[in-house]
Amino acid sequence: MAITILKGDITGQRVDAIVNAANSSLMGGGGVDGAIHRAGGPAILDECRALRASKYGRGLPTGQAVATTAGRLDARWVIHTVGPVYSADEDRSALLASCYRESLRVAGELGAASVAFPAVSAGVYGWSAESAAQIAVDTVRASGTEVDDIRFVLFNDEVYAAFEREM
Ligand code: AR6
């Protein structure tokens, strides 16, 4: 398994699966979620709606992951995961680690050989770059995944620097 870090926009990655830092509604949002839906087009949202109507009537729970088509993106699949909102009162690290483990489990089931991750929860959901990077790198390293090309694609300099230190 090779783990690499890159700076830039995840939507341009030529990988089998791109992970989306979604919210429970699966109905899109800002940040990387908005970018993925904009670049991938309406086919992604159509499948998200179908998932809400079938398996996830109450939304995708925090820490879980589910795949859809990637629409117009180069990737074959988008794997949507829901990171925890940062809390100063409660340690939610296990939920953030679960996002990475579950996304890799779904990727393995799909037969994806390459997966690109954003820094889940490091934006609107309020985690520091440092702790988001530590949990991401530790969890992927310990995952025992069969995915052999894993990339962290980081949009801002501070988050990129934190992943660089962690690696
Ligand atoms: N490519 C890679 N990384 C990106 C991109 C991009 N195109 N755009 C932003 N980032 P966030 P969260 C980085 O807020 O914290 C959404 O509204 C960004 O700089 O996208 O998990 C969802 O619908 C940051 O480092 O996700 C949820 O409601 C990282 O991606 C909520 O935000 C994550 O930031 C989820 O919040």
Image: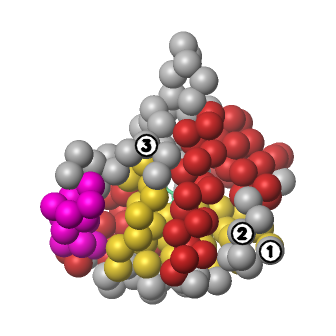
Task: Give the structural element (helix, strand or loop) at label 1.
Answer: loop
Q: Tell me whether the residue at label 1 lies in contact with that at label 2, contact meaning CB atoms closer than 8 angstroms.
A: yes
Quadrant assignment for the C terminus: bottom right
Looking at the image, tell me whether mark 2 or mark 3 is earlier in sequence order: 3
The residue depicted at 35 percent of the width and 73 percent of the height is: 68
Q: Residue at x 72, y 51 (%)?
A: 139
Residue 13 in picture, x, y percent from top left: 54, 77
Asked whether 58 falls inside the magenta stretch, the response is: no
SS type, badge 3: loop
Dot 3 surroundings within 10 Å: few (below 14), some, or many (20 or more)?
some
Q: Is residue 136 above or below residue 132?
A: below
Q: Which mark is residue 1?
A: 1
1 versus 94 height, above or below:
below
Find numbered disc 2 in the image and state the secondary structure of the residue it sits on.
Answer: loop
At a point 60% along the width and 75% down the height, the residue shown is 108
Q: Is residue 148 above or below residue 157?
A: below
The amino acid marked with disc number 2 is: Thr
Q: Which residue is mark 3?
A: 62
Residue type pointed to by label 3: Thr
Q: Nearer the viewer, residue 42 or 38?
A: 42
Instruction: Report if residue 154 is visible in the image.
Output: no
Query: What is the residue that sits farthest to the front in this orientation?
Result: 55
**Residue receiving disc 2:** 145
Q: CA distance from mark 2 to mark 3?
A: 21 Å
Q: Which range of residues does the magenta coloring cover?
A: 44-56
Q: From this viewpoint, is residue 148 visible?
A: yes
Q: Kindly identify the residue that appears in the image at 43 percent across and 43 percent down.
A: 62
Amino acid identity at mark 1:
Met
Q: Residues within 10 Å of mark 2 (few under 14, many from 20)?
A: some
